[in-house]
Amino acid sequence: MKRSFIREILESIDENTISFAGGLPSEKLFPREDLKTATMKIFDNPKAFQYGLSNGITELREKIAARYTKEGFPTNKNNILITTGSQQAMYILAKFYESKDITIEEPSYLGAMNIFRLNHLKMHGIKLEDDGINIEGFKKSFKNTKLAYIIPDFQNPSATTYSDKKREEIAKIVEEEDGILIEDSPYSELYFDKKNISISSKIPKKSFHLGSFSKTLVPSLRIGWIRADEDLIKSLLIIKESIDLHSCGISQYILNEYLEDEVKYENHLQDIRDDYEKKANFFCEQLDKYLPEFKYQKPKGGMFLYGNLEGVDSFALVQKCIEKKVVYVPGNQFYIDKIPNGEIRFNYTHSSFEQIEKGIKLIKSCL
């Protein structure tokens, strides 16, 4: 096992470095006053400081379930398991399927790949195309693994969004092969145009749908969840209890209080979408202006922009960029074999407009 390149690089840079590396939300959009009000209210409730239910406080699970149901995906509180971020959700699932084979996208989320390695899951990477995973490759691999992990909405790292056709095809394959889909969905609310229907809603008994408030509210609360069939949730609960008994109760009560005003949360989500779309458009403009050799697909939402500098070792390039006080994540980190390539993942949500322009100009100078 090796540490995450992203976590290592974030520790090695200083406040003067322009970072396009981590998947950091914009701090100016954190609803600090509303969360402060919610926090003060929970101090009147002694239950907020007591041990809680392993699957999460009932009221919060009910609120999350209601959001699913409102979107046409019937869900109740027993379908929800609260986790310490969606990273823990993935760890619980990896432990549940320890030492099995799993079909994943390539490139794929680095954090998930590290968890799968730690739990001895053998990964089978299938090429990711502009509209989602290659279906022929997925079908062939899934026939053997019966288990898959994908990020259909504004994928990390590629920012790819699955087409409606591919969502239908994947659901059909999972159903026919009697397998299980792990659908990671931390970015689904960060759309610029429309929200896509989850694949899990088409196969509710054969899927785990992972969500998180880290990208839509604040990361430090560390509250995520798994939505699955009730019997599957009961199986995961045994693992969850052995790890931490339950996720932080104070965080759950603060979040639950904040979500009492659903309109306020919806307005907050729209503010994020508007801000991130402006940032994404500006990032693309600066790339076209200063780094036209970088070929990319314009994101439709999420937090990342991904592309390729053909003929360039992006891992070697980032070492030069660190010296110039600008960083990104080289694409080889998102592949199973980590062979050097020209691919790069940029995060555009955390930096200011001035930092975006300056950072891209610095990368051009290093190139």
Image (tube, rainbow, N blue to C red):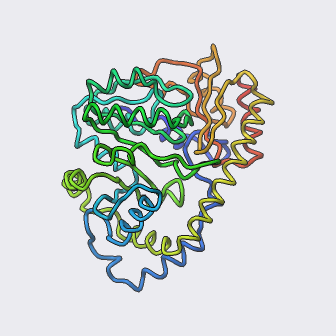
Kindly give the residue lying farthest to the bottom in the view shown.
Answer: 44
Residue in front for this viewpoint, 194 or 264: 194
Picture residue at 33% right of the left edge, 62% below the top? 247
Query: Quarter-wise, where is residue 19 in the image?
Result: top right
Q: Residue at x 73, y 34 (%)?
A: 360
- Left or right of 338? Residue 102 is left
Of the 4 image quadrants, the one containing the C terminus is top right
Q: Please tell me which residue is depicted at 50% across the width and 31% down the height of the picture.
A: 132
Horizontal side of 7 relative to 19 (left or right) equals: left
- Image quarter for residue 250? bottom left
Return the residue nearer the eye: 104 or 161: 161
Foreground of the two, 353 or 163: 163
Residue at 38%, 34% (x, y): give it.
113
Picture quarter with the N terminus: top left
Left or right for 321, reference 77: right
The number of discs equals 0
Q: Is residue 247 left or right of residue 27?
A: left
Q: Nearer the viewer, residue 264 or 216?
A: 264
Q: Is residue 268 above or below residue 367?
A: below
Residue placed farthest to the right in the image? 289
In the rendered image, residue 285, in percent from the top left (x then y), is placed at: 77, 36
Residue 179 occupies quadrant: top left
Rendering coords of residue 175 (x, y %): 30, 36
Q: Position of residue 115 (x, y in %)?
A: 33, 38
Provide residue 288's location: percent of width, then percent of height.
77, 30
